[in-house]
């Protein structure tokens, strides 16, 4: 069996998505997601110009060898653009292997380790009462885990913490340049414990509550947040402080027992190594698309298992349904599954990427179809051309650029 074509499809059914389609001489095709929010065209060019020509003529069953060839053969290692491109190839090859075997991908990964995949939804609003209404919506739909975020009083809508009514708050805003928002750590640290208190008071002790800090605090500010949330038992605090300097997590760990989740911006096992092996975190959030595909993410998750770190794969809507399908096959098959993020896509996106995973009462169930269980309607995709869109930036009140 040989790869005969590697095609890159860019579409924007609400969000930009980059998809790799591999075709073989036996007519079997495979899909991989290559979307890198705000830098989509860089990965598309990397694939079209530098990877596609290397794939034609190769045996698609040699997944591990092709992975090593693209990783080591480039000389330039790691980085989100390279690793997203490799991920797309890797996932498309797993899709092909599953279709040839007549098995869903999770069966190739060792089969089911659990019956279902626990997910969390996003309850976000400007005000605390607004968030309570959103949480009620998730509880009514059967969710047992919800991420709660509210606006910071006195600041206009801030990325990831509030919501402008009628406009979605993430993961990106269409436009030629990022929106600029304002940030105040003190006001934020004041409002989040009040939000958690209100949610616990109304919904009781059983609902899992998560919160995303989007890398905005110093380690000691994050420790203060962890301690102030302690009475409300957070499931996790995500990205409390930037992870470039990983010793920051050692410091944070020494001052709070709040569970910590990190990793959505990581792209290699080397980014995760210290955090995992030093047990400075509780959940690793790397994704299939940005961390080198199923092959590489499984290595990360295996390393994590040795150190009692569980998975919490990133699942925002800037990851295409192809990535979500791949994540679910991993989630259901690994021993150290924790939770899966789930933000349903727009109806337009679901129409462009028909898929057969299933949501039921707070859990997702991976597809039982051979391969990933996702297809791409290329005619529908062509109706939604690429539109520039970027994640916002944050400035402090004096204009200093802050972490987003
Ligand atoms: C967020 C993401 O889902 C999350 O946890 O942090 O929405 C993230 O901001 C985007 O995926 C960035 O592309
Ligand atoms: Mg996040």
Image (cartoon, helix red, strand yellow):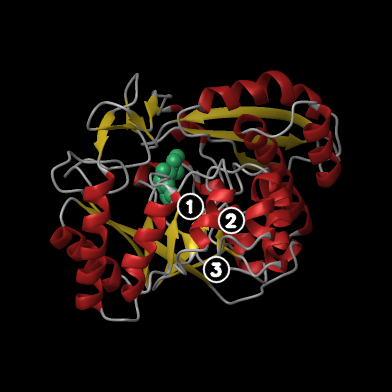
Q: Nearer the viewer, residue 266 or 281?
A: 281
Given contact means CB atoms under 8 Å apart, are the residues at marks 1 and 2 in contact? yes
Vertical comparison of 134 with 355: above or below: below
Q: Position of residue 209 (x, y in %)?
A: 36, 68
Using the image, tell me which numbered label, if any, was put on residue 255: none
- Label 3 sits on residue: 338
* Residue plotted at (69% across, 52% down): 273
In this view, the mark in front (3 or 1):
3
Disc 1 versus disc 2: distance between alpha carbons?
A: 8 Å
**Left or right of residue 110, residue 278 in this image:** left
Q: Position of residue 364 (x, y in %)?
A: 49, 66
Q: Is residue 162 above or below residue 205?
A: above
The numbered dot on residue 327 is 2
Q: Residue at x 52, y 47 (%)?
A: 264
The numbered mark, 1 or 2, whose residue comes first in the sequence reads 1
Nearest the viewer among 348 and 213 is 213
Question: Measured from the top left, where is residue 305 in percent x and y?
Answer: 69, 67
SS of the residue under disc 3: loop
Task: Residue 149: give x, y in percent of width and height.
Answer: 28, 55
Q: Relative to 256, is 111 on the left or the right?
A: right
Residue at the disc numbered 1: 315
Horizontal arrangement in the rendering, residue 147 relative to residue 243 (left or right):
left
Residue 350 appearing in the image: no
Q: Of label 3 and label 1, which has the lower sequence position?
A: 1
Answer yes or no: disc 1 within 8 Å of ligand 1.
Answer: yes
Kindly state the secondary structure of the residue where label 2 is placed: helix
Q: CA distance from mark 3 to mark 1?
A: 13 Å
């Amino acid at each position: 069996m040989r790869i005969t074509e590697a095609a890159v499809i860019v579409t924007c059914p609400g969000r930009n998505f980059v998809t790799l389609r591999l075709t073989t001489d036996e007519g079997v095709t495979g899909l991989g997601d290559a979307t890198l929010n705000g830098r989509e065209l860089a990965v598309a060019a990397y694939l079209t110009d530098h990877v596609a020509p290397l794939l034609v003529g190769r045996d698609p069953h040699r997944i591990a060898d092709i992975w090593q060839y693209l990783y080591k053969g480039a000389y330039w290692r790691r980085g989100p653009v390279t690793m997203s491109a490799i991920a797309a190839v890797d996932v498309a090859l797993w899709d092909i292997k599953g279709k040839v075997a007549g098995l869903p991908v999770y069966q190739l990964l060792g089969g089911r380790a659990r019956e279902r995949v626990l997910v969390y939804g996003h309850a976000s609003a400007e005000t605390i009462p607004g968030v309570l209404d959103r949480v009620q919506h998730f509880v009514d739909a059967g969710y047992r885990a919800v991420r709660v975020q509210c606006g910071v009083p006195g600041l206009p809508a801030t990325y990831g913490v509030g919501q402008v009514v009628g406009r979605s708050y993430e993961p990106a805003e269409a436009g030629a340049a990022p929106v600029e928002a304002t940030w105040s750590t003190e006001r934020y640290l004041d409002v989040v414990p009040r939000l958690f208190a209100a949610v616990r008071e109304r919904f009781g002790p059983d609902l899992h509550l998560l919160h995303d800090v989007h890398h905005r605090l110093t380690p000691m500010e994050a420790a203060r947040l962890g301690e102030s949330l302690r009475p409300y038992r957070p499931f996790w605090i995500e990205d409390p402080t930037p992870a470039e300097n990983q010793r920051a997590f050692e410091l944070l760990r020494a001052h709070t027992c709040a569970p910590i989740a990190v990793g959505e911006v990581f792209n290699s096992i080397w980014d995760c190594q210290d955090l995992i092996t030093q047990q400075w975190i509780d959940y690793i959030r790397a994704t299939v698309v940005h961390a080198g595909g199923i092959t590489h993410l499984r290595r990360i998750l295996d390393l994590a298992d040795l150190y009692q770190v569980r998975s919490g794969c990133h699942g925002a809507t800037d990851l295409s349904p192809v990535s979500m399908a791949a994540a679910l096959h991993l989630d259901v098959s690994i021993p150290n599954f924790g939770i899966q993020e789930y933000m349903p896509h727009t109806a337009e996106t679901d129409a462009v990427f028909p898929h057969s995973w299933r949501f039921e009462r707070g859990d997702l169930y991976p597809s039982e179809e051979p391969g990933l269980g996702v297809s791409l309607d290329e005619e529908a995709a062509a109706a939604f051309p690429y539109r520039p869109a970027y994640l916002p930036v944050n400035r402090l009140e004096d204009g200093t650029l802050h972490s987003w």
